[in-house]
Structure formats: C-alpha cells, structure tokens
Amino acid sequence: MVTVTFKQVWGYANAHVPCNTCGRLSKRRIREYCTVNPFNKNEDGSVRNYSEVAAQARKLAIDEAERQVAAGRTCRVCEAKELSARNGGLGA
Ligand SMILES: [Zn+2]
C-alpha cells in the first residue's frame, strides 16, 4: 500500500478567551494546518503554493481564534465552583 502524505503547513493565532462567568481572560494558542496538495486550489484553479497555503492555514487559525473568543469559556476557578456547587459544596 502506498501512503501519500502531503506537506502540512501550520498557521498560528493567539486567542484571549474570556470566561463567561467572571470575565477572566485566558490565553490560548490556536494551531490549524492545511496541506499543499494538487486539490488545494485557488479561486482561479491554480494549485496553491506553499505561501498561499500558509496564508490559508493562518486564516483558519484566526477564524478559529475568533470563534473561541466569541463563544467564551468557563475558567478553571469558575469550573471548580460550579462543580462544588453541583456536589452540594463537597470537594471544594
Ligand atoms: Zn471564571
């Protein structure tokens, strides 16, 4: 069996994701990759070269970072509080 691996190109972005409960920001590094391959094409049908794929991966990472910032999260402190409240105050 022949396995063809395409070169992975990673894109990075930083997200400062706010806690939905207390507003504390947590930093997150987002990593997304795209591959240079014959099916990864530009709008005009030409195959994307390395730097075009790098831009594509970076855009994916930025989109994902924005999505996570918009969605927010529950920080560790609030998570622990919620958990202990659910357990009737035990285990805090
Ligand atoms: Zn919090």
Image: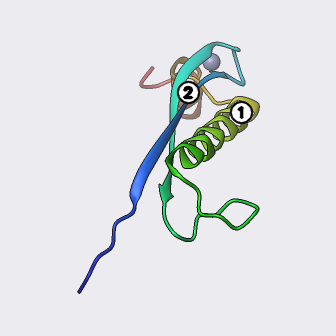
Question: Element at badge 2?
Answer: helix
Q: Which residue is mark 1?
A: 66
Ligand number 1: quarter of image: top right
Question: Element at badge 1?
Answer: helix
| Mark 2–mark 1 distance (CA, rounded to whole Å) | 22 Å
Decide: is 77 above or below 54: above
Q: Which residue is mark 2?
A: 79
Q: Nearer the viewer, residue 78 or 12?
A: 12
Residue found 69% across the figure and 14% down from its top: 22
Q: Amino acid at mark 1?
A: Glu
* Percent position of residue 73, x then y: 64, 30
Q: Nearer the viewer, residue 52 or 20?
A: 52
Residue found 39% across the figure and 56% down from its top: 7
Quarter of the figure that contains the N terminus: bottom left
Q: Nearer the viewer, residue 50 or 23?
A: 50
* Percent position of residue 74, x then y: 62, 28
* Percent position of residue 20, x then y: 72, 25
